[in-house]
Amino acid sequence: MTRIIKILHIVFVIALFILVGCSPSEEEALTSVESIAKNEFEKKPLEANQTHENISLYVPNDFEVTEVSKSNLILENGNQTFIFFYNALEETTSKLNFQAAEANGNDQLLQSFEDNERFGYVKVAKLEKDYELQIGIGGVKVTTQTTLRNIEEDTEKMMKMANSIAYTSQNE
C-alpha cells in the first residue's frame, strides 16, 4: 500500500511540474498577446452574426449578450464579463480610446496598430490577481478581466469582435 502511495505522490509531482511548465511567463504571454492582436487586426473582419441597436458584429459562439444599451454591450462567457463599448461618432482611425488608455498609465503592455483605414491597440494592465485586457479599434473598445493562462485566447476573440463591427442606419 505504501508503494502505491509513493507512486501516486511521484505522479502528482510530475503532473504539477508539467502544469506549471505549460503556463507561459508574463513576458511570454505579453509578447504573444501583442502578436495575436496585431495579426487579428490585420485580418479581414469576420462576418457579423448578431445585430444590436445600431450595430452588427461578430460574437463568438460561446459568448452571450446579457445587456444592451445605447453604446455598450455586456457579454458573458462562463463567469467572465466582457464590456463592448462603441461610439458611432468616432472614425475607425480615431485614437481617442488609445489616448485615454495611454493617459491612465499602469500598463504592462500598450501597443498600437495602424493601416490606412483604421487605428487599433491592445492594452494589458496588472490587477491584484489578474489582468485587465483592453482591445480597441477606432471608436470601439472591448475590456475584460482575465488570467495569464487565458489572456491569449481572450485577445484573439476580443480583437475579432472589435474588428467586425459595422454601424447600421439609425432609421432602420
Image: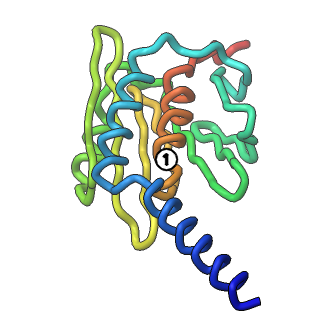
Instruction: Mark yes or no: residue 67 visible.
Output: yes
Q: Residue at x 72, y 20 (%)?
A: 49
Which residue is denoted by mark 1 in the rendering? 143
Q: Secondary structure at mark 1?
A: strand
Q: Position of residue 168 (x, y in %)?
A: 63, 15
Nearest the camera: 116 or 100?
Answer: 116
Residue 82 as seen in the image, left or right of residue 20: right
Nearest the camera: 120 or 79?
Answer: 79
Q: Residue at x 30, y 38 (%)?
A: 98
When the figure is inspected, residue 113 is found, relative to residue 149, above or below; the finding is above
Residue 73 as seen in the image, left or right of residue 125: right
Residue 16 as seen in the image, left or right of residue 118: right
Q: Position of residue 149 (x, y in %)?
A: 50, 54
When the figure is inspected, residue 172 is found, relative to residue 101, above or below; the finding is above
When the figure is inspected, residue 20 is found, relative to residue 128, above or below; the finding is above
Q: Position of residue 157 (x, y in %)?
A: 56, 34
When the figure is inspected, residue 144 is found, relative to residue 154, above or below; the finding is below
Instruction: Mark yes or no: residue 97 visible.
Output: no
Name the image quarter holding the N terminus.
bottom right
